[in-house]
Amino acid sequence: MSIRLTIDDVEVKAEPGEYVLAVARREGFAIPSLCHHESVAPIGACRVCLVQVTFGGKTTLSTSCNMLAEEGLQVVTDTPEVRAHRAMNLELLLARAPGSARVREMARQYGVTRTRFPQVAESALANCILCELCMRVCSRLGHDALSAIGRGDKKRIGPPFGTPSERCVGCASCRSVCPTACVFVRDTATSRTIWGKTFEFVLCKNCGAPVLTREHRQHALAHAGLPEDYYDVCEPCKQADAAGRFANVVW
Amino acid sequence: MSVNPANRPTPPDASQTSSGDALRVLAGISGRVPAGAARTGSGGGMLTVIPRNCVGCRTCELTCSFVHSTHGRLARSRIKVREVGEKRFVQMTCLQCVEAACVAVCPVEALARNEATGAIEVHEGRCVGCSLCEKACPFGHMRFDPEAGLAVKCDLCKGEPMCARFCPNKALEVR
Ligand code: SF4
Ligand code: SF4
Ligand code: SF4
Ligand code: SF4
């Protein structure tokens, strides 16, 4: 049974268990966010998705990513107060991630170009906003190679105990989803280094180009059930080969 | 504006070389693509590749990279013209496989078929950028954009393939 709520005075429907941010985006309302990702549970870490909510006669501000849609809820996505709080949160985030183009651009849209807060001292992960998205995605993929280490000022995201993880497969999904692109990956012609661990690439049988790490291939074979030779050749070589077979048919 | 295959003249040799046939034979060779996979649009036509008509002008690549402007560089075009011999070209593009390796390998169900067009589409909000789909496609048709951290593939332009519309040589058609 559907729930009815309003977003910016428009009545919309939601299913029980749906979050306000997801409903709003589906219905075409724009709400900014940094740490939200549809494939993992929301935690409201970046606090940029704040909206005004009225429920049972009470009006407050709330993060929308992890707020469940409720019957009769009234959501307003943009008020001066909402903007002011988003701006403040972005100013804090700017102190943590001054090197992130995405954070800088989002802050600029809220009129924030400088931060009054002390910039976070050079850390193991410069520009990390501690949103744990990398960690949540890594767990979702079944690798569980990352965790939050330390508390408060000392909090860091990384492999548990700060030593290279046995469980990491070098897939670099953490880097793909990181909103500030601060996960450091170094690829060479034959190896990838990420979170302090170096992996060897499987090299294309035809041309020797890197395809994926051995551990990532192992994991994919165990979970996707595709033939082993699917990962032996790089994409351009596969395409050239398929084009050749296609051509033999045509001419 | 939609492509209306019925109103277009039949290109020379198309009856023998329509990729409908070619695709089917390719499927036979690889054993991996069931026949007639790529439907498109509500009319149910297929994006059809006619390599004999292709002169290698790469208009399709240019069109594709412009239409999908968020990843709009020629190198990121979803269709790729490959030279397979002296003045012989084959336009390589996703076959929208019925049993697709990319879909099978995706760990977060970010790839799914749009039943209206027949295209397998990337749901960007769900993609975690693991790049496995790019590695798994047996034809090398899947792309991974490392800057965006997202998979990129042919979506048949939501049912009206622009590569077919702009090909000046009737080497790509919806039929
Ligand atoms: S490394 Fe990136 S994804 Fe991970 S907690 Fe830091 S900012 Fe978030
Ligand atoms: S590279 Fe390692 S830490 Fe990052 S998502 Fe993959 S398994 Fe997890
Ligand atoms: S990307 Fe490859 S595996 Fe996926 S549908 Fe297209 S041709 Fe098939
Ligand atoms: S890159 Fe994205 S679409 Fe491709 S397999 Fe990984 S999560 Fe799925």
Image (cartoon, helix red, strand yellow):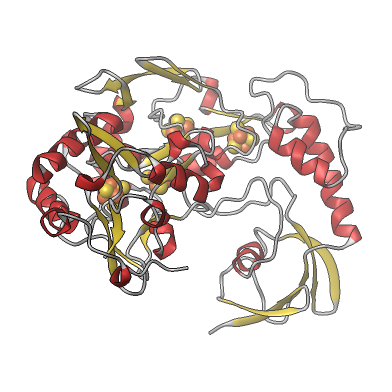
Asked where in the image residue A95 lies, by quadrant, the reply is: top right
* Residue B75, position as x, y percentages in the image: 44, 34
Against A1, residue A42 (above or below) is above
User: Does residue A145 appear in this view?
Assistant: no
Q: Nearer the viewer, residue B110 or A46?
A: B110
Instruction: Work out whether A56 lies above or below B11.
Output: below
In x, y percent, where is residue A47? 74, 49
Image position, residue B41 (x, y; %): 36, 69
Image coordinates for residue A142, horizontal then vertical, percent? 39, 42
Query: Which sits in the foreground, A192 or B142?
Result: B142
Against A20, residue A236 (above or below) is: above
Q: Is residue A37 left or right of residue B44?
A: right
Q: How many marks?
A: 0
Which quarter of the rendering shows the C terminus of chain A? top left
Q: Residue at x 87, y 40 (%)?
A: A112
The residue lying at 84 percent from left, 39 percent from top is: A91
| Residue B129 shows in the view | yes
**Left-right relation of A212 to B129:** left
Q: Is residue B73 left or right of residue A244?
A: right
Identity of the residue drawn at 60% across and 63% down: A22
Q: Is residue A87 left or right of residue B158?
A: right
Q: Nearer the viewer, residue A34 or B13?
A: B13
| Outermost residue toward the bottom in this view | A1
